[in-house]
Amino acid sequence: MVQEKNDSKDKDMILPPIQQNRPALSWEMKIKKKLKTVPPCLGKFRPTVGQCCHQCTPDSLRNTLGQTSSLGFHNLLSVNETHTRYRGWLVRRVCCTLFVSGLKVYASPVSNRLERVCQSTRVKEALTAELQAPEGGDSQGQLSHLSPLLALINTCISPGLLRFLSWVMLKMFSSVFGSIQVNLNHLPALHRASQEGSLLVYVHVRQSIVDCALIPLVLFCHNLRVPYTVSPLHINSSFIRSILQKVGVVLLPSSALTELDAEMDRLYSPVIYSLVRELLHEGQAISVGVSAESGRGGRWLANVTQLIKEGSVPDVSLVPVGISYDCVPKTHTQVGLSTVLQWLWSLLWRRPGGSVRVHFAQPFSLKEMCESGRCRVDEWLPLQDLLLPVILNNRADCVFGQRKMSWLLPSSHYASELKEPTHPERDLSVAIILHLIFSSASCTAVMSTSLVSSLMLYRHRKGVSASALCRDVAWLTEELLFRNKDVGFGGSLEEIVRYSLSLLAPHLIIAAVPSRRDPFIVPRPSPDATLHLALQAQIVTHTFILEAVGACAVAAMLCEVVGSGVSSRVRSDGVDGEQVNGDMEFDVVLCQSELTERALQLCHLLPPGFMPPCQSAQSFALDAVDSLVRCGILIMEEIPRDVPICDFWKKEGALTWTTSDDPYLSDSDCDVEEQDLRSYKISHPSQCPEMLFFLCSMLAGHLRALCWATSGLDLLHTPLPEAEFVAQIHSHLCDTANKKKQHFESCSEEAARTAVRSLIDLGVLSEERQRGGVFLGVGPLFQSSENKQQLQRFISQYLFN
């Protein structure tokens, strides 16, 4: 926690009253006085976000300790005469122009970059293989083969054009967003690193194309070096391409529609590797967006990691960036001149809505992470090795280890290179990508629309009154702050709820009955509305992931108790024959070892970014169970022991010792030997289902999509190309949700891609690489319908009904 000062800039954190698009309602909410204000911090302390990992990079953390002060926030769109050196009536009219013209722009030399890239060993080898000629072949022929990539290599930053486009973006974003709040606490660390000559690489999780514009704009407005921005856009217009490439935007080749198409080119990977090396040698900064479900963008980070391992670059400081939107802007990956003109025309008729919060985390040394050995990957195992023995053989013991996610670094990255890196180097690159995805999500603030979306989708799917929603908003805000999660709002509780409802109005039904002054709010039962709410609620799920995993494990054991008809099955004291009467009238005791095992099995099914990669899955599962005790769902029950706990010398075997700096050690690891003697009971059975359902619903969308995808395998004629396979699975998910007329959060494109990837890792689907690409088919082990049903039963046990 950081002490919050009474800085004048903190007034930007208070939400302004939203008059436009306000629901035409007049309610009087009878709420206690202490709940009428929602603070953005706990007392005088604000959550500290974006700190370096104390396990993987302790030296980087030590360098920044004691240097962070609470500087508040800066609204990037609030430009006035105080930001310039001049004063007066005319200055107030042109203050934005004066502000932009007075900012510093760092030089970007590109005089001989093409020559240096062509002289690279990897590019020479790739060109030799392409030309089928001796290495010292015709330079004219080499340039002809590199012609589609010449514009990419010659990307530069023009100071005049950068200032003009920054002014245009400030004006455009003023029409799109109400405010762009920048956390100033870690900007001094970036200034120090820039002055010391450190190479900075900014990493964010892809949400929208707007991310690629926000990060350079924020850095430019704070006199920091504008990075070369890697963009996945496919630009049709040559005019727009030439403009973007002169402000440091690295685009895909004009012949490639997607990143996958670009990577199929044998010259693309070596050219990109050489380009990254030359940019870092020039002292340039780089901004990269990573996709958590497909791994796109990880290739750029792998290049940086490999340069560090080879010694071509001394060190690089990685900076995770968390960007949170009140409403994520909808953008297209393919942009033409007509698309841009239509979007600019629409800005003239729209009012600004929603805010953006940008957090820059503390920079940490990539060399330290690579060479310290603290970022372990030695326990990584394929998912089928971790879960198939449990699913098919019902084996009591579970294989402990970490799920291997090698697909985060697509294999096509090394397809065109003559020397393929060893598995440890590849695994280390994947571990760093995972770490950055988790770090970016961890420093992302929770906006008010995300909070209300999670409550409407996971707790009040059947509707809620406005007064009850306000009470839940106050409660959930406190829970987020207690978990050291920053929130992007503050102020009057009524205004926060009104503001959120005004932005979410197209996705909600707000009904006002004349007889009562408290309106009733229901999520709109449509796929678009549910998917929007689910997208907004993802950051809340990330915050409560420990509790959600623990709650799903409890739900799995309770379902087993209800199905068996006796509660003795999960009792550790051996009592049997006690019949279950009613839903929650029985006194059930949950054994810690079995509860932890269920949580551990569920951990292996989580998408990337939810679980910290520097923590073992077993430690995470133990913490998940402990989190339910901390939040009051479970209470520990003491079990009589034959041997007193103080008589530890009578225990069989020798004492085991662990080091205090073991990265896999958690608070729950200290008493692993006592697990079998511990058990838990549900604290308040009559109140438990509502809280359990709220936590279980956070993961229900992902698990249900996995179940539906498994059931849809019988409808597909395999093998199919990967893209077509994902499209048909997505269509099946949509059809299933439409038939049931609910659970639309399980039918998104992201859910389909994540489900297919999990089925591949489980061995349900087999990958065959052919000339046309990767083809997917059902593996021989799951040709049997019985094995598919066992897999569905295993997944559905975590779906609390």
Image: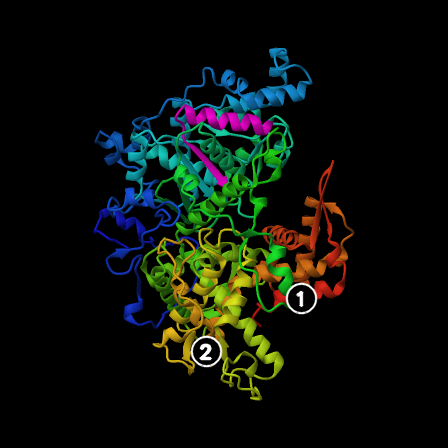
Looking at the image, residue 233 sits to the left or right of residue 719; the answer is: left
Check disc 1 and report its element: helix, strand or loop.
helix
Question: Is 674 in the magenta?
Answer: no
Mark 2 residue crowding within 10 angstroms, few (<14) / some (14–19) / many (20+): many
Mark sitting earlier along the chain (1/2):
1
| Alpha carbon distance from label 1 to label 2 | 30 Å
Mark 1 residue crowding within 10 angstroms, few (<14) / some (14–19) / many (20+): few
Amino acid on which disc 1 is placed = Asn
Q: Which residue is mark 2?
A: 682
Mark linked to residue 95: none
Using the image as rendered, state which of residue 25 and residue 379 is in the foreground: 379
The part of the image, by quadrant, that contains residue 415 is: top right
Residue 386 seen in the figure:
yes
Farthest residue to the right: give it.
717
Check disc 2 and report its element: helix, strand or loop.
strand
Looking at the image, residue 46 sits to the left or right of residue 795; the answer is: left
Q: Which residue is mark 1?
A: 393
Question: Is 287 in the magenta?
Answer: yes
Using the image as rendered, state which of residue 582 and residue 622 is in the foreground: 622
Amino acid on which disc 2 is placed = Ile
Q: In the rendering, at what x and y percent does residue 602 appear? A: 55, 62
Tell me whether circle 1 and circle 2 mark residues in contact (CB < 8 Å): no
Relative to 579, is 516 above or below?
Answer: above
In this view, the mark in front (1 or 2):
1
Using the image as rendered, state which of residue 749 and residue 529 is in the foreground: 749
Relative to 645, is 271 above or below?
Answer: above
Task: Tell me which residue sits at (37%, 80%) in the image.
Answer: 644
Q: Main secondary structure of the magenta part?
A: helix
The part of the image, by quadrant, that contains residue 131 is: top right
Q: In the rendering, at what x and y percent does residue 214 appear? A: 42, 38
Q: In the rendering, at what x and y percent does residue 562 appear? A: 59, 80
Looking at the image, residue 601 sits to the left or right of residue 765; the answer is: left
